[in-house]
Amino acid sequence: MSYHVLVVDPNEAFATMLRIGLEEMGGNQVEIAANAREATRAVASKKFDLAIVDMGLTDVSGPRLVRALCHEYPNMRLVVIPLDEDKIPAELQDVNIAGVLPKPFFLPELPAQIAAFMGDEAPPGLEGLFSPPGPAEPTVPVVEEPPAEAEPEPVAEPEPIVELEPVVEEPPSSGPVEQKPLPTETPLRHDEIVQAMSRLAQEVGADAVLLTDGGQLLAHAGRLQERRINQLAPLVGTLWESSTQVARVLKKRQGRFEETIQGSDYLLYCMVLSEGLVLSVVVTGRASLGMIRHRAKETAETVRGLMAT
């Protein structure tokens, strides 16, 4: 089932990420309120099935707003985003709370979590569709909340789809994959770049995130076998080169590069950071392209910043 959901969170970037996830992965209708005043106006004018309230509101305390909503709208389910722990705040123990959504959370699990909050069964086949990332190479760190000042990119329509032939699984490589040395003319902070890519992989449920330069692998994160990553890197370079050749034929300057290749159960999304430098996201199974684009662009900005420092 789909629901009308109100997200009350002062962090616009986080609220937008939550909205996109709820809409594109669960088919819900979602509205955002940045504070208690906006939330009060929203529930007074429309009927909501569920309200997700962050406890770190700036105008009125989160618990106070939750109590007011529970009193005025007893049929609306309430979920809280706690400040620290993953449990209902002590001051709300006597309030009928449907559940807790702690930060950080794993985006692909949202539909099942919302179903649980509403007392429904999880959508058929949802369990196991995405499994939380296992030990990655390098280790995937905990996903941090996006900074409040980040401006979310508008969700655009998907690019034309190109079908790929399915890849036949092969045993993992017995030796390490050779990577192109990171450019020495720019003081790249490799570990921090990989951490940013790992956060992206965990947040969108990606199997792999690659950073390539002309088809040469610079860095990667995620749970995909290194052999597969090594096979994908030159393909990304080919996509970039094809785009460059088209611009050359048309006598146009090569500018924005963004490519989506999607099959029935996989997706490859690529975007350019600078000349030949491409960030790619690989997802198998169900995926939200809008969410991937939004988070990939945020990660691209982070990587650019790290490369410039």
Image (cartoon, grey):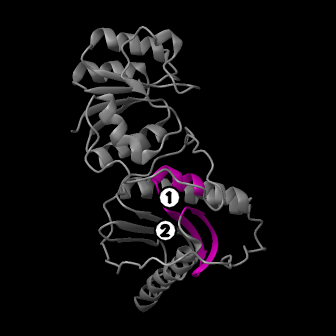
Q: Is residue 273 left or right of residue 21?
A: right
Q: Quadrant of the C terminus?
A: bottom right
Q: Position of residue 135 (x, y in %)?
A: 60, 56
Separation of marks 2 and 1 at Cα, in angstroms: 8 Å
Q: Quadrant of the N terminus?
A: top left
Q: Which mark is residue 232?
A: none
Q: Of the residues shown, which amino acid type is indicated by label 2?
A: Met
User: Is residue 70 placed above or below 104 in the rendered structure?
Assistant: above
The residue at which mark 2 appears reads as 271
Q: Position of residue 307 (x, y in %)?
A: 69, 63
Label 1 residue SS:
helix
Q: Of the residues shown, which amino acid type is indicated by label 1?
A: Ala
Query: Which residues make up the magenta segment?
Result: 198-223
The residue at which mark 1 appears reads as 296
Q: Position of residue 186 (x, y in %)?
A: 75, 69
Give yes or no for residue 65 being in the magenta stretch: no
